[in-house]
Amino acid sequence: MDHRLSEEYEALRATVEEFAHDVVAPKIGAFYEREEFPYEIVAQMGRMGLFGLPFPEEYGGMGGDYFALCLALEELARVDSSVAITLEAGVSLGAMPVYRFGTEEQKQQWLPKLCGGEMLGAFGLTEPGGGSDAGGTRTTAVLDGDEWVINGTKCFITNSGTDITGLITVTAVTGNKADGRKEISSIIVPSGTPGLTVAPKYSKVGWNASDTRELSFADVRVPAANLLGERGRGYANFLRTLDEGRIAIAALSTGLSQGCVDESVKYAHERQAFGHPIGANQAIQFKLADMRLRAHTSRLAYYDAASRMLTGEPFKAEAAMAKLYCSEAAVTNAREATQIHGGYGFMNEFPVARMWRDSKILEIGEGTSEVQRMLIARDMGLPEA
């Protein structure tokens, strides 16, 4: 098996790497400290075609694939995770459900602007009392004539309150199945719809230059045609969305891990202690060797999961393993990078401080580490509780 990138993939990777270092790196620290969304950086990403990477040209996309998106995410996250998660959520959670499950009319209506980065989409799944128990959805949608009437609350929703947010795909209970279980469907709610309240942005530990908010729906009315996919298939469809998204989060985690290596190697050459660079100390060398190993193994894990997905093979367990390993590796690398930097690692002017703050959410978002272990165990045929 050859994991070397093709010329096309390598050209994309190098282009995003250059953009990340020349455009994102010099500016993002100030946005992060102000907790401000970087609109101009996102607009440049849109003009580069990053939001359209995995979509066909007929919808305004670049005609690439999901692996291309993952390569872009890795390179962006080597420098900053706020920008990377804005792209990941905008594509994997915002636009991809429309592409996978939408009608042709819905695709024509929404995808061109989503692919161009002129508009961001959000995925309204998580609820205050739900978390990992997405099947416990309480938000409801009742069909009243030719309109859905939606009531409920969603939380931790990325890209949901920016000036360019255009739609939120909401999972809601639309009835009950014959066996008594909830019938969960997905419905597109355009931004600005009466009854939709977007709360002020959260005060977060990390990802401070990205947009995350709570949403409330009070008798929100949208056309019945805004149903996304088949009625009652919302639960199954969002599971597919999350399986794909976990590969993307694994790629983002790999980028953060590699960024920690990059910054720490540079610092180990520059920092002098006791008459020589600290990189000459075996303790530092061993830390850096382990950090590089984690980043390398992470890359292989998400490459494998993405490859299986693109060839049509089952990939749920591989996506879970990649997300689990890569996110935990990122947290460890961020901790070690901070330790190597010493007191400077605790100062926000150094990128590793940002990486340390950004890393923890990777073990939580799009399925906690515990959920990933549960999925892996199920794939081995172990009984459910």
Image (tube, rainbow, N blue to C red):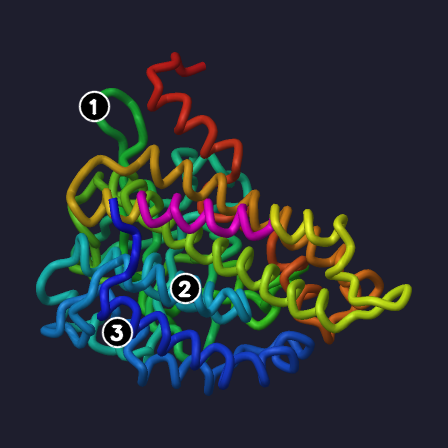
What's the CA distance linking mark 1 and mark 2?
A: 42 Å
Q: Is residue 301 magenta?
A: yes
Q: Is residue 297 magenta?
A: yes
Q: Nearer the viewer, mark 3 or mark 1?
A: 3
Question: Is residue 31 visible to us here?
Answer: yes
Q: Nearer the viewer, mark 1 or mark 2?
A: 2
What amino acid is labelled 1 in the image? Ala
Residue shown at 31% from the left, 48% from the top? 244
Q: Which residue is mark 2?
A: 73
Q: Of callouts 3 and 2, which one flags the residue occurring earlier in the amino acid sequence?
A: 2
> Is residue 329 toward the left or the right of residue 94 in the image?
right
> Is residue 237 toward the left or the right of residue 286 in the image?
left
Residue 178: mark = 1
Secondary structure mostly seen in magenta is helix
* Front residue (pair 274, 384): 274
Query: How would you rate the neighbour count of disc 3 (Cα within 10 Å): few for under 14, some for 14-19, many for 20 or more?
Result: many
Residue shown at 35% from the left, 59% from the top? 70
Specify start and end residues of the magenta stretch as a single range: 291-304
Query: From the image, which quarter does the N terminus lie in?
Result: top left
Q: Which residue is mark 3?
A: 115
Residue 138: mark = none
Q: Secondary structure at mark 2?
A: helix
Query: How would you rate the neighbour count of disc 1 (Cα within 10 Å): few for under 14, some for 14-19, many for 20 or more?
Result: few
Q: Is residue 259 above or below residue 254?
A: below
What amino acid is labelled 3 in the image? Cys
Write down the quadrant of residue 58 in the picture. bottom left
What's the CA distance linking mark 3 and mark 1?
A: 39 Å
Q: Residue 62: x percent and y percent?
A: 20, 73
Residue shown at 57% from the left, 72% from the top? 209
Q: Residue 379: x percent and y percent?
A: 33, 23
Q: Residue 271: x percent and y percent?
A: 79, 70
Q: Of callouts 1 and 2, which one flags the residue occurring earlier in the amino acid sequence?
A: 2
